Image: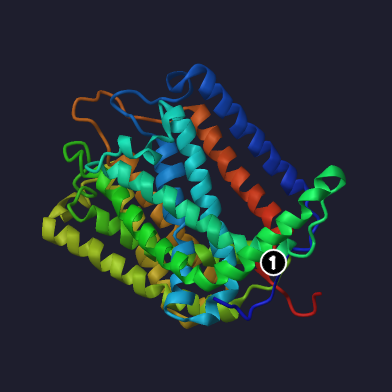
């Protein structure tokens, strides 16, 4: 799989005031993680037997997995459907997906009660084929492996012929160069297999996240509980993939002082209308078939959150992306894509938090200060790692006039 696009590391100073702020977020997340390990979930969170999941699942895991869908949607677009005009944004989308899934795994380490048993799905003797969560865990584990394999050619491109370890480590230079050459020669020939595997694995676990909720029919509000919830989760992940790539690309352009790649992003915004429209049709059809539209205007918190999710996260951006002049203006295109991203995030929060209410609970869940701080810290850490990687590795396309 050979690309004609030239890439280069970002030639910007790494240590900026913004980076120091992100380092503060890293310290915050590390503090909460250590506190949780020492004192336990009960002391760190507002979770209990009635509310076993909170924002660490709704945001850090469910939302994080959905927003990482840009990796497999863009890879499929460029390499399976042979739309090579979108190749300039594939590496950035791959990095976003890789970091998204890596931080999902890190978030689970903090959220799981027995975090030290997270390795159990790797042991066939401990497999449980009847569990939707087992399927999610296996797919995420395999897909994360695929993502790192897909990233290896970038590592090879960056360091091949440049390995010069100091001192006694210099004896490893030859071995490392041989490995980099091996990656460069072999992975390029079979990379299409990993792209296909990534698409298949992503479709499987994106839908299975919806299957998790199907086991609690009496605890989920009718506006969201539906037998086709796995399908809706998959469609929403596909619909947010391309808008997430637009948001990531335009944000990187702004931060690094680059010109937005509108020749790629404008048609990408037009293409995003297809999955977004399919998702909207499926969502509306489900309401009509189940006759749950009667809950839309009952004045409850659930009804307002559903209307916000659909109105601002689906309908408004669909109308905006349908207008050519909107897609051609970077601020408006960014806003439309951002609304889709926020809409899917609200959907995951709605399903896992707003819609979830145990029948006999006499109170509602609200995250603790520690939960909120950890989520903010993890988001800051992800942005920090992204900044470091694009500074070291050739992720973004080479700009005209640069060397």
Q: Residue at x 32, y 62 (%)?
A: 235
Q: Name the image quarter holding the C terminus.
A: bottom right
Q: Is residue 154 left or right of residue 298?
A: right
Q: Is residue 308 above or below residue 186?
A: above
Counting from the top left corner in percent of width and height, residue 141 is at 43, 47
Dot 1 corresponds to which residue? 157
Q: Residue at image x 57%, y 45%?
A: 379
Residue 183 percent across, percent down from the top left: 61, 63
* As drawn, 198 above or below 14: below
Locate residue 393, reporting x and y percent. Answer: 70, 60
Is residue 255 among what the camera can see? no
- Residue lying at the far right in this picture: please name it: 167
The residue positioned 22% from the left and 49% from the top of the image is: 223
Q: At numbered mark 1, what does the secondary structure look like: helix, strand or loop? A: helix
Q: Tell me: 166 left or right of 242.
A: right
From the viewer's side, name the closer residue of 269 and 86: 86
Quick one: label 1, few (<14), some, or many (20+) residues within 10 Å?
Answer: some
Relative depth, front residue between 70 and 338: 70
In the displayed structure, does residue 251 sit left or right of residue 402?
left
Quarter of the view holding residue 203 = bottom left
Q: Is 297 or 196 nearer to us in this picture? A: 196
Residue 40 visible here? yes
Count of marks, rendered view: 1
For the N terminus, which image quadrant?
Answer: bottom right
Q: How is the image coloured?
A: rainbow
Task: Give the residue at x 46% y 49%.
Answer: 64
Q: Position of residue 267 (x, y in %)?
A: 49, 80
Query: Dividing the picture into quarters, in which one does residue 256 lie?
Result: bottom right
């Amino acid at each position: 799989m050979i690309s004609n696009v030239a890439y280069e590391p970002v030639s910007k100073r790494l240590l900026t005031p913004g980076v120091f702020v992100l380092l503060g977020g890293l310290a915050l997340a590390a503090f909460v993680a250590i506190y949780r390990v020492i004192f336990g979930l009960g002391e760190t969170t507002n979770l209990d037997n009635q509310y076993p999941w909170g924002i660490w699942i709704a945001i850090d895991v469910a939302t994080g997995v959905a927003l990482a869908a840009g990796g497999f949607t863009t890879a499929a677009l460029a390499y399976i459907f042979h739309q090579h005009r979108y190749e300039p944004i594939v590496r950035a989308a791959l990095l976003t997906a890789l970091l998204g899934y890596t931080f999902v795994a890190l978030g689970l380490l903090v959220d799981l009660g027995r975090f030290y048993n997270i390795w159990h799905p790797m042991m066939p003797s401990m497999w449980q084929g009847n569990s939707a969560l087992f399927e999610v865990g296996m797919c995420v584990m395999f897909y994360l492996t695929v993502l790192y394999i897909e990233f290896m050619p970038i590592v090879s491109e960056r360091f091949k012929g440049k390995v010069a370890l100091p001192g006694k480590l210099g004896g490893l230079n030859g071995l490392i160069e041989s490995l980099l050459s091996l990656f460069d020669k072999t992975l390029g020939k079979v990379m299409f297999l990993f792209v296909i595997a990534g698409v298949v694995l992503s479709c499987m676990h994106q839908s299975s996240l919806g299957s998790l909720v199907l086991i609690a029919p009496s605890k989920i509000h009718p506006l969201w509980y539906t037998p086709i919830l796995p399908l809706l989760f998959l469609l929403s992940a596909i619909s947010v993939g391309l808008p997430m790539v637009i948001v990531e690309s335009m944000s990187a352009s702004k931060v690094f002082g680059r010109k937005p790649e509108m020749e790629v992003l404008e048609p990408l915004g037009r293409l995003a209308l297809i999955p977004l429209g399919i998702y909207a049709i499926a969502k509306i059809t489900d309401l009509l078939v189940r006759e749950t539209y009667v809950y839309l205007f009952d004045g409850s918190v659930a009804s307002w959150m559903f209307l916000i999710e659909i109105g601002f996260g689906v309908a408004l951006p669909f109308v905006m992306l349908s207008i050519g002049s909107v897609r051609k203006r970077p601020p408006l295109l960014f806003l439309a894509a951002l609304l889709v991203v926020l809409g899917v995030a609200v959907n995951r929060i709605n399903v896992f938090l707003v819609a979830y209410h145990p029948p006999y609970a006499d109170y509602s869940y609200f995250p603790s200060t520690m939960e909120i701080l950890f989520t903010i810290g993890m988001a800051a850490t992800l942005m920090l790692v992204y900044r470091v990687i694009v500074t070291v590795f050739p992720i973004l396309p080479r700009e005209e006039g640069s060397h």
